[in-house]
Image (cartoon, rainbow, N blue to C red):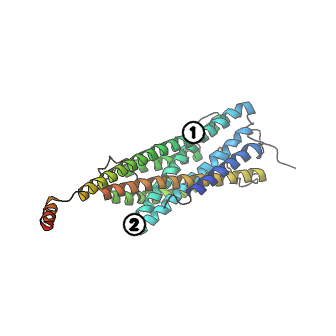
Amino acid sequence: MPFPLPIAAPALPLDEAGKYVAAAYIVFVVLLVVYVAIMASKLQRIEREVRELADHAERRAAGAGESGGQAPPDAVASRGAGGG
Amino acid sequence: MYAKGLRTLSIAAVAMLALALSMVFFYAPLDADQGFIQKIFYLHVPLAIVALVGFVVAGLFAIAHLRSGAARWDAYSYVSIHISVIFGAAVLVTGSIWAKGSWGHWWLWDEPTLVSFLIVFLLYCTYYPFRYAIEDRERQARYASVFAITAGAFVPLNFMAVRMAQSLVHPRTFATAEGGMPGEMMLTFLLCLAAMALLWATLVKFELTAKSASGQVRRLRRALSAPAPAPASRIAPEVD
């Protein structure tokens, strides 16, 4: 013979229980979305820093190129003396 | 390095979550005792199990850190605790919602399961100010590892103590005497547990990847001798 069902805690009707179930699952989804939003802001900061570093590296490369392309004055003088 | 396999893991976690939630609402039968509100357990219990296992895993990573001295183990431990604390917050909120619907109270202070979980949660909440209080990064990592090991050992002891407690107002998901859940419920529950574990692993990997990217940016900045911005966090361990 099967055990009788416990009657101490009767089941809530669906319309009553539904709001609690919905609230629990919504809390879970909201926590996930908040976490993803925080991680997205971190990702934005990393992207901004990478962009700054890329700009910095390009400026440095351009500066090095300019100083490398211009011959120093003493080299020009010695070239002029040798070529005459 | 940390991003390897992240996409596959993310897709697996999302697919598993979708499947598990579909089974919760369309496959698992209604509980004869509690009715529809029992559906909260498919969320609440796996979250609790994964959070507690995550705390223990953080302790294991901390042991690896103290044994090897490698900073990455400290980062694993930190991130595991971080994600488990988030899961723990979800456990407390979803449990309170269930308690309100089922017991008519948001919280019962004389229920060992609830209070013990709150103690574990609050214990791990102190991990952040504990780390923050130590300036030196190496000491911070070492002390945090000792904390993670001690607290990680406390978790199973606490769980067993609650299981042995006499108060059984809080339902036991795996019944010990009159049989467990029926097959459909058990299958759904195990899928929910697997989905939560996958979600936890994905978030840990995601967070580690973000920390690694920040570490690489800092390395690049040092190599280029570029001006450094204000540090984003003094608590989080650096990952290279």
Q: Is B91 positioned to the left or the right of B191 in the image?
A: left
Report crowding for label 1: few under 14, some 14 to 19, many 20 or more residues within 10 A (C-alpha).
Answer: few
Q: Which type of secondary structure does the marked residue at label 1 adopt?
A: helix
Residues under numbered marks 1 and 2 in contact, where contact means CB atoms less than 8 Å apart: no
Amino acid found under the numbered disc labelled 2: Gly
Q: CA distance from mark 1 to mark 2?
A: 37 Å
Image position, residue B7 (x, y; %): 58, 55
Q: Residue drawn at (69%, 54%), measured in percent from left and top?
A: B190
> For this rendering, which residue is in front, B87 or A74?
A74
- Quadrant for the C terminus of chain B, please: bottom left
Q: Chain of mark 2?
A: B
Q: Which type of secondary structure does the marked residue at label 2 adopt?
A: loop
Residue B61 versus residue B135 in the image, above or below: below
Q: Is A70 positioned to the left or the right of A8 in the image?
A: left
Image position, residue B230 (x, y; %): 32, 46
> For this rendering, which residue is in front, A20 or B212?
B212
Q: Is A33 positioned to the left or the right of A20 in the image?
A: left
Q: Chain of mark 1?
A: A
Report crowding for label 2: few under 14, some 14 to 19, many 20 or more residues within 10 A (C-alpha).
Answer: some
Amino acid found under the numbered disc labelled 1: Val
Q: Residue drawn at (63%, 49%), measured in percent from left and top?
A: B14
Please name the residue that numbered disc 2 is placed on.
B69
> For this rendering, which residue is in front, B58 or A29?
A29
In the rendering, which numbered label is found on residue A12? none
Image position, residue B79 (x, y; %): 48, 54
Q: Is residue A69 visible?
A: yes
Corner quadrant of residue B41 = top right
Please name the residue that numbered disc 1 is placed on.
A30
Q: Residue drawn at (52%, 40%), measured in percent from left and top?
A: A34
